Image (tube, rainbow, N blue to C red):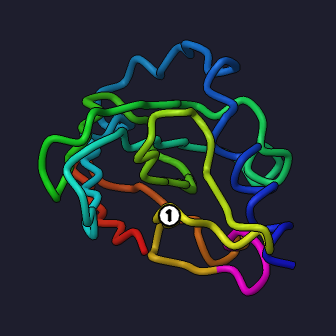
Amino acid sequence: MKRLLFITLFFLINTTSFAQEISYPERENEISVFELIVEGIDEERGEIRIAVFDSEEAYADKEEPLHAIVLPVEENRISWKQDSLPYGKYAIAVYHDKNVNGELDSNLLGIPKEAYGFSNNARGRFGPASWKDAHFEITSQQYSMTITIK
């Protein structure tokens, strides 16, 4: 089951090549300034990889995230800001790619060796967190979330 977690997270995060630009609504009151803070970074090296999904289907299929972000790790806390995120439901998956190989590394049993996390700090039992546990809804012009990776 741990191997399933690794495989699922691998495909969930490594869909960065499918990220696409989207057009946002024109009305200002439907747009939020979103800030994501990633904490729990134990080493100041490598990259933080973030995948933002805007539907349960995209999250479940692990394809085409709304945003796929790669940030260098220079501190033990990282912030990412999106100035024009439309109101709606989202789920986020994050992992710390310490060796910058673009993969969530795991041991022989499939247990991840690199820290990872999901929005709402949700945890899956033998795989990624479910949409039900990880999704959140943006309904205000300012929204901030902190994910602690483990």
Q: In terms of depth relative to the viewer, which is nearer, 22 or 71?
A: 71
State which quadrant residue 42 falls in. Answer: bottom left
State which quadrant residue 89 falls in. Answer: bottom right
Q: In terms of depth relative to the viewer, which is nearer, 38 or 92?
A: 38
Asked if 21 appears above or below 80 in the picture, the reply is above
State which quadrant residue 29 falls in. Answer: top left
Instruction: Answer with left or right where residue 109 lies relative to residue 129.
Output: right
Q: Provide the major secondary structure of the magenta segment.
A: loop
Residue at point 45%, 34% (across, down): 100
User: Looking at the rendering, in which quadrant would you find the N terminus?
Assistant: bottom right
Looking at the image, the residue that sits furthest to the bottom is: 125
Asked if 31 appears above or below 128 in the picture, the reply is above
Q: In terms of depth relative to the viewer, which is nearer, 17 or 101?
A: 101
Looking at the image, the residue that sits furthest to the left is: 75
Marks counted in the figure total 1
Q: Secondary structure at mark 1?
A: strand
Per the rendered image, the range of residues in magenta is 124-129
Asked if 42 appears above or below 23 in the picture, the reply is below
Q: In terms of depth relative to the viewer, which is nearer, 68 or 95?
A: 95
User: Looking at the rendering, in which quadrant would you find the C terminus?
Assistant: bottom left
Residue at point 72%, 29% (across, down): 64
* Rendered location of residue 23, percent (x, y): 53, 14
